[in-house]
């Protein structure tokens, strides 16, 4: 019995010595050259540092706690972790304990037994079980990266929705102020018409500007309600009034973008969770190849037990009652109509698909960063120009209104300058929003934090 147990121990030590999986290699996707950062520089920053607006921070916290899509991602992690534990458990022997009492016919006799044994434990000489466990582990890592990607996307989407809500609230404010101003101008125009100071054409144009502003007020009021519904869907529940954007939220910085040099290192892309997930899927495919290759070799499984047996309960643990069994089995693959060959070819094809998927993911990441940087290059100048344009139209409106009141200009000039000022103010809101959304897009493209 001791000899057989020693043989089992030696076999267990030898199990898993061979590994038929291909050597892991990270593919190098075809990308343009990217200058490296200087020594010690980093592009990593936590989203709580990136976004400094307190209301937006609390809104994102609520979304991370309640969002259903993120909850599904977390549950997928639990499922992948359980699958990995199942595969990992196959690498260890299953030990069973049995207690039996057998009674049989005339004359009455019985037998008592207690045994401890292994049940069909596979010796993993060629790494089949180990590679299956490794594939499950890499799949688990990929699911975890998918959760990180979902969280980064959720943070970006909530921030974008919150900023859109702030922008439409600002647009509604501008439309209401313009409507109030134009209604006052219309009242003055109606009195001026009675005195013969303006024509019917001037009155008609004044009314047209009022109705245009009314249309915008109604449109932005409806859009504001839709924006809030979209934000609450992302948040996963009603949003308290104190978390809604305050007036003028877009006029100051609501987020802080990491100061980036002109060139970015390619290593930045490798931190993106979607790139890491693609790499883990590639590792899982390589492990599947190892398991498929191992299926061509013999497999050895052990069934063994040791214990005591006696015809009386009192003599169950007395000397001379020991029993044992040792049943090794060798499974020799001979003919399976090409099933194992097809399984290996499938695993190899899956690996090529994983390589292509990894390269495409990296290329997509590169393009997203490049597009965000290209857009950002013109946004600062566009914002400066739009602010200057708005200031110039404010000056023009003030001057034309003063000249009209002094009789040195027509009312048509006042109406035209008022329309230009309204368009410039609305354009300034849009440019400010685009500048903020670009910060979020770049932060998301760099893999978040």
Image (cartoon, rainbow, N blue to C red):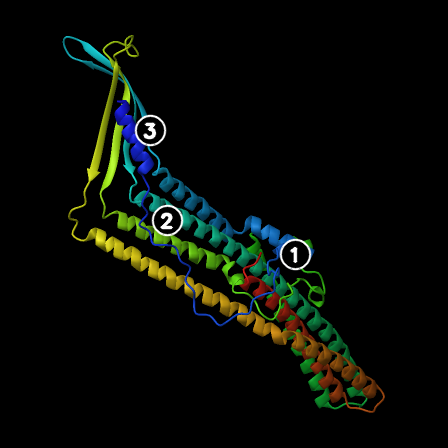
Residue 54 position within the rendered picture, expressed as x and y whole percent measured from the top left: 69, 55
Query: For the point 69% across and 78% down, which residue is it?
Result: 386
Task: Depth check: give the residue in front, 58 or 284.
Answer: 284
Task: Depth check: give the residue in front, 4 or 202.
Answer: 4
| Picture layout, residue 194 above or below residue 167 | below
* Residue sitting at the far left: 106
Residue named by callout 1: 49
Say which quarter of the image contains residue 446: bottom right
Query: For the point 47% across and 50% down, which residue is it?
Result: 144
Residue 34 position within the rendered picture, expressed as x and y whole percent measured from the top left: 53, 70
Which dot, 3 or 1, sits closer to the camera? 3
Label 3 packing within 10 angstroms: few (<14), some (14-19), many (20+): few
Query: For the point 41% across and 50% down, which residue is it?
Result: 138
Q: Earlier in the sequence, mark 1 or mark 2?
A: 1
| Picture layout, residue 290 above or below residue 327 | below
Q: CA distance from mark 1 to mark 2?
A: 36 Å
Q: CA distance from mark 3 to mark 1?
A: 52 Å
Say which quarter of the image contains residue 17: top left
Per the image, label 3 sits on a secondary structure element best described as: strand
Residue named by callout 3: 95
Per the image, label 1 sits on a secondary structure element best described as: helix
Residue named by callout 2: 135
Can residue 2 be seen in this snapshot? yes
């Amino acid at each position: 019995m001791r000899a057989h147990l020693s043989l089992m121990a030696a076999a267990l030590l030898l199990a898993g010595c061979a590994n038929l999986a291909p050597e892991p290699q990270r593919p190098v996707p075809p990308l343009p050259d990217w200058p490296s950062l200087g020594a010690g520089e980093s592009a990593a920053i936590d989203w709580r540092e990136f976004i400094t607006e307190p209301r937006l921070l609390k809104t994102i916290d609520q979304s991370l706690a309640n969002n259903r899509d993120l909850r599904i991602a977390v549950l997928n992690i639990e499922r992948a972790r359980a699958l990995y534990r199942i595969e990992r458990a196959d690498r260890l022997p299953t030990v069973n304990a049995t207690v039996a009492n057998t009674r049989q016919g005339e004359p009455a006799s019985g037998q008592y037994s207690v045994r401890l044994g292994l049940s069909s434990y596979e010796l993993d000489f060629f790494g089949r079980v180990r590679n299956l466990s490794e594939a499950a582990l890499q799949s688990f890592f990929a699911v975890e990266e998918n959760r990180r990607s979902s969280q980064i996307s959720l943070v970006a989407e909530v921030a974008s929705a919150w900023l859109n809500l702030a922008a439409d609230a600002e647009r509604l404010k501008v439309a209401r102020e313009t409507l109030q101003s134009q209604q006052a101008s219309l009242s003055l125009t109606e009195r001026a018409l009675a005195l013969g100071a303006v024509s019917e054409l001037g009155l008609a144009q004044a009314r047209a500007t009022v109705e245009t502003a009314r249309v915008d007020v109604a449109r932005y009021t409806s859009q504001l309600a839709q924006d809030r519904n979209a934000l609450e869907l992302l948040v996963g529940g009603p949003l308290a009034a104190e978390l809604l954007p305050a007036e003028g939220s877009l006029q100051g910085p609501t987020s802080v973008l990491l100061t980036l040099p002109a060139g970015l290192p390619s290593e930045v892309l490798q931190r993106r969770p979607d790139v890491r997930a693609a790499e883990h899927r590639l590792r899982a495919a390589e492990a599947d190849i190892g398991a498929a290759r191992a299926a061509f070799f013999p497999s050895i499984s052990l069934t063994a037990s040791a214990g005591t047996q006696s015809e009386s309960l009192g003599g169950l643990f007395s000397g001379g009652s020991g029993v044992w069994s040792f049943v090794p089995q060798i499974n020799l693959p001979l003919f399976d109509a090409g099933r194992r060959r097809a399984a290996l070819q499938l695993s190899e094809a899956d690996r090529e698909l994983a390589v292509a998927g990894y390269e495409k993911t990296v290329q997509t990441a590169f393009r997203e960063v490049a597009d965000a940087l290209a857009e950002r290059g013109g946004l600062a100048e566009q914002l400066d120009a739009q602010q200057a344009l708005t200031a110039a139209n404010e000056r023009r409106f003030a001057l034309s209104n003063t000249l009209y009141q002094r009789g040195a200009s027509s009312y048509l000039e006042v109406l035209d300058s008022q329309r230009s000022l309204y368009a410039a103010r609305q354009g300034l809101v849009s440019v400010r929003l685009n500048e903020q959304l670009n910060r979020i897009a770049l932060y998301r493209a760099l893999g978040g934090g």
